[in-house]
Amino acid sequence: MSTETPKRIAILGFSLETNRFAPICGEREFSDRGVFYGEEITEDARRPAPVINGGICGFFKVMDAHGPWEPVPIAFAGAHPNGPAEKSFFNGLLQSMREGLEKAGDLDGVYICEHGAGLAEGNDDPDGEVFALVRGIVGPDVPVIATLDLHANISERMVSEPDVLISYITNPHIDAFERGEEAAHCIIEMFGGVKPKMASIRIPLVAPSVTLLTAEGHPYGDLIRVGQTKLGDDIMNVSITAGFAFSDTDRNGMTITVTAREDQAKADALARELAIAGWADRERYQAHMTDLAECTRMALEVGQDASKPNLLFCDPADNPGGGGRGNTTYILKSFAEAGVENCVFAVFNDPALVKRANDAGVGATFTATFNSEETNQFSEPFEAEVTVEKLSDGEFAGTFGMVKGRTVQLGRSCLLRLGSIQIIVISIRQQCLSNDYLQHFGLDAAEARVTVVKSRGHFRAGFQHIFPPERIIEADVPGLTSCNLLTFPWKHMPRPVYPMDPETTWEPPAA
Ligand SMILES: [Zn+2]
């Protein structure tokens, strides 16, 4: 029997994908997604259908199976993508992390579950701040491993402070759990004496978000797959983060981060090789959007002709998964006015309208004002007569895509009928991630002729059993997360940057 004392590993993180052009993200928005202190982290991570980030759940799974260990859960706060974190909230979180780590006493390791594209009010690098705080307290010799979203914007501190950075390799992100497992395996290796060496290179490529899928045939996925073929005895991890354009930071740009088990030169050489390959392939990052008039024509046609395959339209410009408010009415208004038939909108964010529907009750018909309380420039009000078909508390367990095995919380919700269109209206802003969101209301995208989701691409994993890529149409309408990057008032984005500035050049670092 081993006489080794169980390893004590602190667990913490801050997870916010920040759109600088979206409203401030306060305590309320964080509590909508989940703020966990101390033992709440452990309890949720070990639940059958957890709410907390899958990375933490994966980390717990491997550590629990590995043998006795002592989790030292500190604090974790995540919100749906939004504007910068409110200063008081972020500083309060940092304070909880500082106090928790100081009280923890001797630690053997730290796992940080971070998103990596964060901003806080008055702080353009909150992720680096968390990493530096951790390193400052535990000192240089304690292993610190961090997982990141693949939309992370990598700062210098994010590379210099932890020992290993591990980003997702799938988009839609269906590997959060596996990356948490990988983080646990890495920390176990470090307990065994491995001293990782990291190299990181950024290239001036900020691609429209719809071009960053990782399925076969997409340039980003192709590059990630090349990176994964290099893993082995020498190379511990390859993370290629495309970044999140709408954070508008001085660290935007695709970043290749390689961790070698011992040889810095091997990490440097592979990062350089992959950066050169990524830059050489830059012209493939092209969006192919469909304008609203054409979308409406297609929807009308499919709604009337049952012999044609049904279609899914997505609205990448109002993606709550990128800070969009999930409530612009361009597509809804156009489809309603054209008389599109047998159509489901999933999901529309409007707490005030849900309340109105609750007050009216199932079966009631009333004149609804969509966006009666929203102030965002893109979220115009829209009036229409609707009937309340269903009311719900909005909670269910997911079975498809990114919500498989997880608990989804939409807040109080309702199903409204507007002519031949059914609209799911929710109170906790988020994107529709799967057919579960429809099925919760007794609907099914396989039955509808036309399905509309406000999402950039994560929905794909939750609808792939119904819609092959050629039956998914990306609608080009205005919004906070539009793929027309030249329309944004960038202030911090390094320029020139490809493809916004076609003349952009880049030279690899000396070998
Ligand atoms: Zn992401």
Image: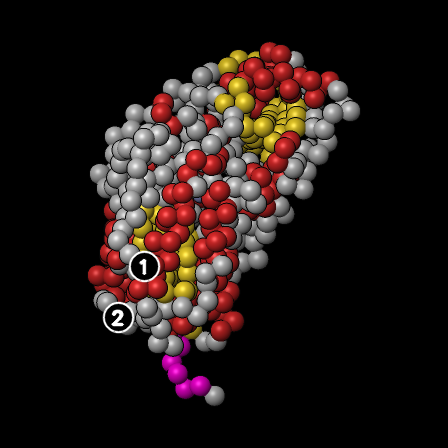
Residue 270 seen by the camera: yes
Name the residue: 29% across, 69% down: 142
Q: Residue furthest right?
A: 307
Element assignment for label 2: loop
Please rate how many residues cluster around mark 2, counting C-alpha atoms within 10 Å: few if below 14, some from 14 to 19, many from 20.
Answer: few
Give the residue type that dot 2 points to. Answer: Asp
Earlier residue among tags 2 and 1: 2
Eyeballing the image, is 112 above or below 255?
Answer: below
Residue 221 is left or right of residue 38, and the answer is right
- Mark sitting on residue 268: 1
- Determine which residue is flagged by label 2: 141
Q: Is residue 4 magenta?
A: yes
Give the residue type that dot 1 points to. Answer: Asp
- Mark sitting on residue 298: none
Closer to us: 184 or 9: 184
Please rate how many residues cluster around mark 1, counting C-alpha atoms within 10 Å: few if below 14, some from 14 to 19, many from 20.
Answer: many
Compute the Cα span from label 2 to label 1.
Answer: 22 Å
Q: How far across and how far down the image is residue 387, in percent?
A: 64, 19
The answer to which quarter of the image holds residue 423 is top right
Q: How is the image coloured?
A: secondary structure
Residue 356 seen by the camera: no
Q: How far across and how far down the image is residue 374, in percent?
A: 41, 22
In the image, which residues are magenta? 2-8
Q: How far across and how far down the image is residue 31, in percent?
A: 41, 43
